[in-house]
Amino acid sequence: CQRLPPELCGAILQGVKLLLTSSVRMVFEGSSVGRGRWPRWLAAAADIRFTGYSREGSHTLLELSLPQLGEAAPELYEQTEFWPTRPRPEATAVDVLADVVGDVAHRNPDSVRYDHALLGRLARWGQVLSEHLEAISLVGSAPALVSFNRQVAANAKELIDRTPPPQQVRVVGKLDMIRHSTRSFALELEDGSEVYGVLEDHQQVELLREWFGSRVLVLGRAVYRPSGSLLRIDAQRVESGAGQPRLFSKVPPP
């Protein structure tokens, strides 16, 4: 690459591939990690191709090609919105990552665009910054330019430190929504509020169908935002909630 050492360009591209995948998974599934094989739509959405480079003054421009999310994951846009951060169908994975970086740059403690794992990956990406590389600007379809720099990496570490650790919980509610494509489900609690959950793998989704619209008991880990509010529940097991006390039908605090 022009002006940048070749090994540094390789580190940038390797890191951005993982961040793009994690960011896209987060906005659609509510979790930046998952078990098993990547779903087809995720592999398509993060199909990043390096197409060339150029130079503009002291800046090195790395040119990437990515599909629009509406083309890569049409089945997700045919369904009603589930996770509240679904991007525009015209957006790409770079736009999604730019939104994540923007929230971290502003130290947004209530963001639903990142979790602990994604913050960790963003903080580690900061290791590519050096005297040769002061910042990485993400140029997507949005007019605003978002830069990843040392301050953003430091913010990611700070947000990690502020995030309460996950804890084992029992939550009871009506199984109000299931989405097989993203391993996601929603529970309606006694007070009418909703809690979002993510299953470990797609096979577990089939087990939920018999309880759709019924009261269930979810056993798993509560995952929190840096503000202390609940982000999601990583469900390890789901059972019938018949006879379970109302005590468990509330958002578990950290």
Image (tube, rainbow, N blue to C red):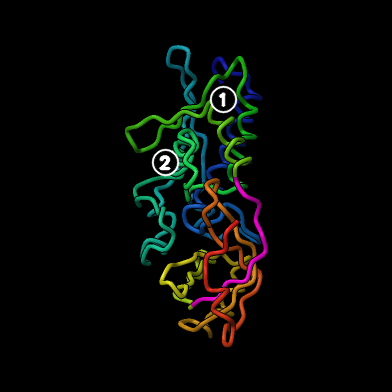
Residue 254 screen position, x and y as percent: 60, 56
What residue did someone put label 2 on? 95
Q: Are marks 1 and 2 in contact (CB under 8 Å)?
A: no
Number of the label disc, if any, that sits on residue 222: none
Within-10-Å neighbours for mark 1: few <14, some 14–19, many 20+? some
Give the CA separation, mark 1 to mark 2: 20 Å
- Kind of residue indicated by mark 2: Asp
Kind of element beneath mark 1: helix
Question: Which residue reaches farthest bottom?
Answer: 243
Residue 106 screen position, x and y as percent: 45, 34
Q: Earlier in the sequence, mark 1 or mark 2?
A: 2
Magenta segment main secondary structure: strand
- Kind of residue indicated by mark 1: Arg
Question: Which residue reaches farthest front?
Answer: 247
Residue at image position (38%, 50%) is 87
Left or right of 241 on screen, residue 138: left
Residue 50 shows in the view: yes
Magenta part of the protein: which range?
Answer: 163-173
- 176 or 72: which is nearer to us? 176
Residue at image position (46%, 44%) is 93
